[in-house]
Image: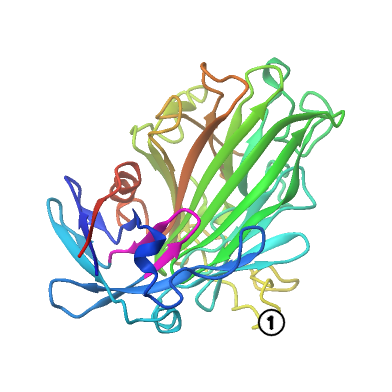
Amino acid sequence: MIELAVHAGELERVAPLVTARVPAAALAGVSGALGAGPIGEQAEGGACLLRDAAGSGASVVAQYDPFREELTFVVPGALPAGSTQRFVLEEGAGHVEAARAAPHPVRVIQKLDRLVFRVGDEAFATYNVHGGRRPYFWPVLGPAGASVIRGQGTSDHPHHTGMGLNYGGHSEGGSANIWSDWDEPPYGPGGRMLHRGFRRLAAGPVFGEVVQDLTYVNAYGDPIVDEVRTIRCWWTSPSARYLDFRFDVISARDRGPQPFLFMMRLPDFFDIPSSGRVTNSAGHPVPPADPKDRYYRAVWIDASGPTGDPPPPPPAAPPETLVDLPGARRPKKGPGQGPWNGIAVFDHPGNDGYPGVVGKYAGGRGTVQITQAHYPPAGAPNGPFSFRQRVYIHDGDAESAAVPTHCADYTHPCRVDIVVI
């Protein structure tokens, strides 16, 4: 029997995602816990049930990754500061039974040019890997059904698309530009991030995960960066949706400062700053009193606003068809209309230079860009190095969604003790 003790520590936790290292041999008696599918192919995460050891009888679904020997699950409800919650592995529970009990199972559907993340029966996010200068997310649907990031085709900075990792900025110091979709100077000619393939696509009862190989090339086709990207998706509730990113840069051979820019463009209907708002851990005013003062260090930054009426639900098939259909009714654009949704970006304390520099500006129509910059560390200018981000999509604004609490849980995760009885 395996017992797991989850310690809140000094922080108040709200449905934290916890991960514990458990040897695969300890789960040999649990049918299906080790999952199915090798690395390099579509895989199904192993599932098992944990029972609350306090005697409530409540069960929690956990997902096991046999390659990392990690057991991951969401602690339901609140975990008060200083408290400990104990769980016992139900050895008789099989994979099928556990998977059926999962409240928010994640599927990763591969298409020719994109991946579609579906949680339960709902579309959530699309990761576009072909057709652009770099892979990007769009749409990413909030609880109200509208995308909390902007796609293509608007008059304000049309070369900013969706959310994802960009590179090179404004070609500072000669670094290749894989940021703008414009090829003419001063931004171009530009390079590309080339999708080389997926090492792993894993669905599961708790999370879905993608591991991707990429090579960056400059305008002449010369390879300048090799990267392995890991993306994990999960929900703790329909009102709290998450994407985790880990960027492992194996080598960087470009000149200049080599800025890696985690960037997103927010939708027009947030109407920032007239209706919607941007808040951050630094208390930096947005927009700033001095328009030139747009860079600051922050552990988290959040943008939220009214989404208007949500679009009509998409057809049941095909599954990649989401909300942006020809002729679909668009969300209202009037200020203050519709349910309020938001998106927050968290920095990780393991990143070099933490907390990182955040930059943003307001466009002519009130739209906003959020960018967090990462640079190669001084001790490894050509790699290897890595950096991480978490994105939290939520109902309400930063205060009602407890963004600082969720960020603290990311930067200081729960400690988990494991006892094999």
The outermost residue toward the right is 220
Badge 1: residue crowd in 10 Å (few <14, some 14–19, many ≥20): few
Question: Would you say 291 lies left or right of 159 here?
Answer: left
Expressed as whole percent of the image width and height from the top left, the position of residue 266 reads 56, 49
Residue positioned 37% across, 57% down in the render: 23
- Three-letter code, disc 1: Ala
Residue positioned 59% across, 56% down in the render: 210
Q: 89 or 155, which is in the foreground?
A: 89
Vertical order, 406 against 286 (above or below): below
Which residues fall within the magenta stretch? 62-75
Q: Is residue 273 visible to us here?
A: no
Vertical order, 233 against 260 (above or below): below
The image quarter containing residue 47 is bottom left
Residue positioned 18% across, 62% down in the render: 85
Expressed as whole percent of the image width and height from the top left, the position of residue 396 reads 37, 60
Q: 72 or 185, which is in the foreground?
A: 72
Please name the residue that numbered disc 1 is placed on: 317
Q: Is residue 321 visible to us here?
A: yes
Q: Quadrant of the C terminus?
A: bottom left
Residue positioned 43% across, 83% down in the render: 100
The image quarter containing residue 225 is top right
Expressed as whole percent of the image width and height from the top left, the position of residue 273 reads 47, 44
Q: Is residue 224 magenta?
A: no
Question: Would you say 324 lies left or right of 10 here?
Answer: right
Specify the principal SS of the magenta part.
strand
Where disc 1 sits, the SS reads loop
Q: 206 or 338, which is in the foreground?
A: 206
Expressed as whole percent of the image width and height from the top left, the position of residue 257 reads 62, 18
Q: Is residue 67 magenta?
A: yes
